[in-house]
Image: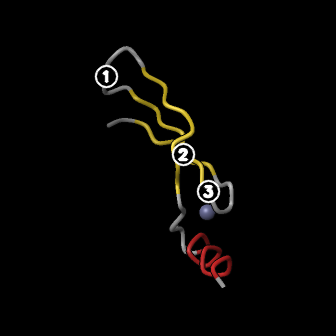
Amino acid sequence: MILKLKKLLCYLGLHNYKTINIEYGFNPTDRVTTLECKNCGFTKIKSGG
Ligand SMILES: [Zn+2]
């Protein structure tokens, strides 16, 4: 049941992200964060703040 719920949340775009990598640029605001979903493995790259 829990697994089904997690899959449903992912399907809706509500991934359970964890931070797997953070890269910094020249400015502190030039931060690129790589997020990975703990449930389905979907990765997302977030830049800025
Ligand atoms: Zn997911």
Mark pair 1, 2: CA separation? 18 Å
Which residue is disc 3 drawn over? 38
Quarter, ligand 1: bottom right
Relative to 12, say whether 30 is above or below: above
Tell me where residue 39 sits by quadrant. Answer: bottom right
Q: Which mark is residue 28?
A: 1
Q: In this orientation, which residue lies closer to the viewer: 1 or 13? A: 1
Residue 9 screen position, x and y as percent: 56, 74
What's the residue type where badge 3 is placed? Lys
Residue 8 screen position, x and y as percent: 61, 79
State if disc 2 and disc 1 touch (CB < 8 Å): no
What's the residue type where badge 1 is placed? Pro
Relative to 42, say whether 25 is above or below: above
Q: Is mark 3 within 8 Å of ligand 1?
A: yes
Q: Residues within 10 Å of mark 3 (few under 14, many from 20)?
A: some
Q: Which mark is residue 35?
A: 2
What's the residue type where badge 2 is placed? Leu
First along the sequence among labels 3 and 1 = 1
Q: In this orientation, which residue lies closer to the viewer: 47 or 36? A: 36
User: Which of the image's four quarters has the N terminus?
Assistant: bottom right
